Image (cartoon, rainbow, N blue to C red):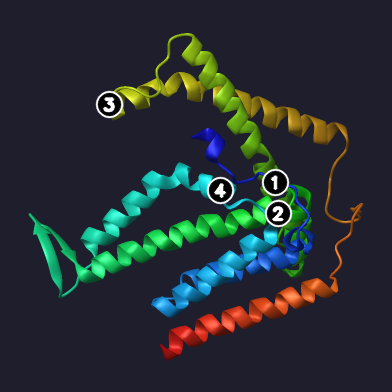
């Protein structure tokens, strides 16, 4: 299960998506999320599906590699679907169990919400899988640069996000090592009821938190020892600059957003 988490991981490949400016990919992800929660009918669903398939094909990242990230949120998707299924009011009642009612509107909302969550995980994975943490940090800092005029710590926000993304694969690997060590000592993380399995996670969480705090303290000491301050006067080895393909990507994004809005208004 832990190996299935793809957030924060980078998949090296030579593709058009990999070569795009990180600011373009951040904007594309934002527009994609907006469009994802804007469509209601089948036309909007088909537009978002076609856009997602196109991006995945252009990224040259194996689809199976992206889909395996869904295994970590199966329980969250099921809970979301059940809430929408039983708590959505409607006139067309299909089934009533005690005080719980299943309506046609609830079924539609549950299906669309499941689809949105799947598309959300897969779509946002494209950005992290095709962008290195350094590029993502520089792109976010550049995109939020206007907020510095109102004294928003843009560089600190970008640095925190970069460190968080870097720590995700490290903590996953650390968790896997601790889990194997505990299983070698007789710990059982898979059998038993929910309460028993929750109790068995305590020997895993305690050393994991200690390791995480130790790594964070070592990183802070290393940054202080190197007199790292960031912000004003900081230079970059690879400064960001737009290319022709980036402007073409912006044009495609605007056209996609317009089509989604038109599909929602007209249909």
* Mark 4 to mark 3 CA distance (whole Å): 31 Å
Residues under labels 4 and 2: Cα distance? 15 Å
Tell me if label 1 and label 2 are in contact, CB under 8 Å: yes
- Measure how far apart labels 1 and 3 are at the Cα level: 36 Å
Q: Secondary structure at mark 1?
A: loop
Q: Is residue 30 above or below residue 80?
A: below
Separation of residues labelled 1 and 4 (CA atoms): 15 Å
Q: Who comes first in sequence, dot 4 or dot 3?
A: 4
User: Label 3 crowding class (10 Å Cα cut-off): few <14, some 14-19, many 20+?
Assistant: few
- Residue 248 position in % (x across, y down): 76, 77
Q: Position of residue 236 (x, y in %)?
A: 90, 53
- Say which element carries label 2: loop
Local SS, label 3: loop
Do the residues bearing badges 1 and 3 touch, measured as CB atoms within 8 Å?
A: no
Q: Does residue 63 appear to the left or right of 114 in the view shown?
A: right
Where does label 2 land, which residue? 130
The residue at 27%/26% (across/down) is 193
As drawn, the label of residue 193 is 3
Q: Which residue is drawn at the image coordinates 87% and 67% (left, top)?
A: 241
Q: Which residue is mark 1?
A: 10
Q: Residues within 10 Å of mark 4 (few under 14, many from 20)?
A: few
Q: Residue at x 79, y 56 (%)?
A: 138
Q: How far apart are the two marked residues, 1 and 2, measured between alpha carbons?
A: 6 Å
């Amino acid at each position: 299960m832990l190996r299935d988490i793809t957030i924060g991981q980078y998949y090296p490949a030579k593709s058009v998506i990999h070569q795009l400016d990180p600011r373009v990919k951040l904007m594309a992800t934002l527009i994609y999320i907006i469009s994802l929660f804007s469509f209601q009918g089948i036309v909007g669903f088909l537009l978002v599906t076609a856009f997602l398939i196109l991006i995945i094909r252009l990224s040259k990242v194996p689809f199976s590699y992206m889909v395996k990230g869904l295994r970590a949120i199966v329980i969250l998707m099921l809970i979301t679907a059940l809430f929408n299924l039983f708590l959505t009011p409607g006139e067309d009642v299909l089934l009533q169990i005690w005080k719980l009612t299943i309506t046609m509107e609830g079924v539609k909302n549950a299906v669309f919400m499941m689809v949105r969550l799947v598309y959300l995980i897969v779509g946002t994975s494209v950005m992290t899988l095709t962008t290195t943490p350094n590029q993502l940090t520089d792109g976010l800092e550049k995109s939020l640069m206007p907020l510095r005029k109102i004294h928003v710590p843009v560089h600190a926000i970008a640095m925190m996000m970069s460190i968080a993304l870097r720590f995700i694969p490290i903590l996953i690997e650390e968790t896997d090592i601790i889990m194997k060590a505990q299983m070698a000592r007789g710990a059982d993380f898979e059998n038993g009821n929910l309460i028993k399995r929750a109790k068995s996670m305590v020997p895993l969480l305690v050393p994991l938190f200690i390791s995480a705090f130790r790594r964070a303290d070592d990183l802070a000491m290393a940054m202080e020892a190197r007199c790292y301050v960031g912000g004003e006067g900081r230079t970059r080895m690879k400064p960001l600059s737009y290319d022709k393909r980036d402007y073409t990507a912006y044009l495609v994004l605007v056209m996609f957003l317009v089509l989604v809005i038109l599909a929602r208004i007209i249909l």
